[in-house]
Image: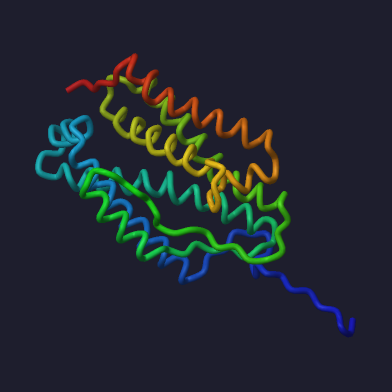
């Protein structure tokens, strides 16, 4: 009809869609983050002792492979949670890296501290507080589930070399979930709290419980591997 038209902000309306710039940014961000994790974990005896025993001179390469897997599963899937939830709502949504954030992340890893700021998912379109809340909770929810999988793996494979991967999975995702749920703008927690206080309370309570489990529950049983 004359004078009437429809704009669909997401050209792949309600379906997962990736842009060429986004794919480039994802690859660069994941590689740099994996390198930063490798540098940081290089000085962690719990991880390196086994890798050096199992892989010898290739231990660092093995550590990079594990770090890349962790980054993709933990960080990238967090961003995909935001991205796909937004796209399902018909919004334009793509990941963009922070070049300076990646540089800071890499530099800080040399000091044994990882401030992961690879980038973020950018969203455009009309979005009410309810949709914003659902998009925001999607990322931390994935980290909460992945942390739980990590804990299950720690108990199931205790005494097996793969327990190292599950411990790192539980550790990374516990921190990511709690950090992102803090009610401080522009973190996810502030948007979830504005949308639904009950969901925010439950989510942050679970993330705190997982972090407590990491430091007290895991340390009580003790993790080890057979060599």
> What sort of colour scheme is used for the picture?
rainbow
For the point 36% across and 43% down, the residue is 70
Q: Depth check: 31 or 101 in front?
A: 101
Residue 158's place in the image compared with 46, above or below, is: above
Q: Residue at x 31, y 46 (%)?
A: 114
Location of residue 128 (image quadrant): bottom right
As rendered, which of 129 and 170 lies closer to the eye?
A: 129
Q: Nearer the viewer, residue 183 or 145?
A: 183
Farthest residue to the front: give it: 184
Query: Where is residue 40 shown, x and y percent of the image?
Result: 24, 44
- In the rendered structure, the answer to whether residue 89 lies left or right of residue 137 reads right
In the rendered image, the vertical position of residue 147 relative to residue 24, given as above or below = above
| Residue positioned 67% across, 45% down in the render | 194
Q: Residue furthest top?
A: 220
Q: How many marks?
A: 0
Question: For this view, does 69 lie left or right of residue 40?
Answer: right
Q: Is residue 109 left or right of residue 102?
A: left
- Rendered image quadrant of residue 205: top right
x, y percent for residue 35:
26, 53
Residue plotted at (85% across, 79% down): 4
Q: Position of residue 87 (x, y in %)?
A: 64, 59
If the image is split into quadrants, where does the C terminus sit? Answer: top left
């Amino acid at each position: 009809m004359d004078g009437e038209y429809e704009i669909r902000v997401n050209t792949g309306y309600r379906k997962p869609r990736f842009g060429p710039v986004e794919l480039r940014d994802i690859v660069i961000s994941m590689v740099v983050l994996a390198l930063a994790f490798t540098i940081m974990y290089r000085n962690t005896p719990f991880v390196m002792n086994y890798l050096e025993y199992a892989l010898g001179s290739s231990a660092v390469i093995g550590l990079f492979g594990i770090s890349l897997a962790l980054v993709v599963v933990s960080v990238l899937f967090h961003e995909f949670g935001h991205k796909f939830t937004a796209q399902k709502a018909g919004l334009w949504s793509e990941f963009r890296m922070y070049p300076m954030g990646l540089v800071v992340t890499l530099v800080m890893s040399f000091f044994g501290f990882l401030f992961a700021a690879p980038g973020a998912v950018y969203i455009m379109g009309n979005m009410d507080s309810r949709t914003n809340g659902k998009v925001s909770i999607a990322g931390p929810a994935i980290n909460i589930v992945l942390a739980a999988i990590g804990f299950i793996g720690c108990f199931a494979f205790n005494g097996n070399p793969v327990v190292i991967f599950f411990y790192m999975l539980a550790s990374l995702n516990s921190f990511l979930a709690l950090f992102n749920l803090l009610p401080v703008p522009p973190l996810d927690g502030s948007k979830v709290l504005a949308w639904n206080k009950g969901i925010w309370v439950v989510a942050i309570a679970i993330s705190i419980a997982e972090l407590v489990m990491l430091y007290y529950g895991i340390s009580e049983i003790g993790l080890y591997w057979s060599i």
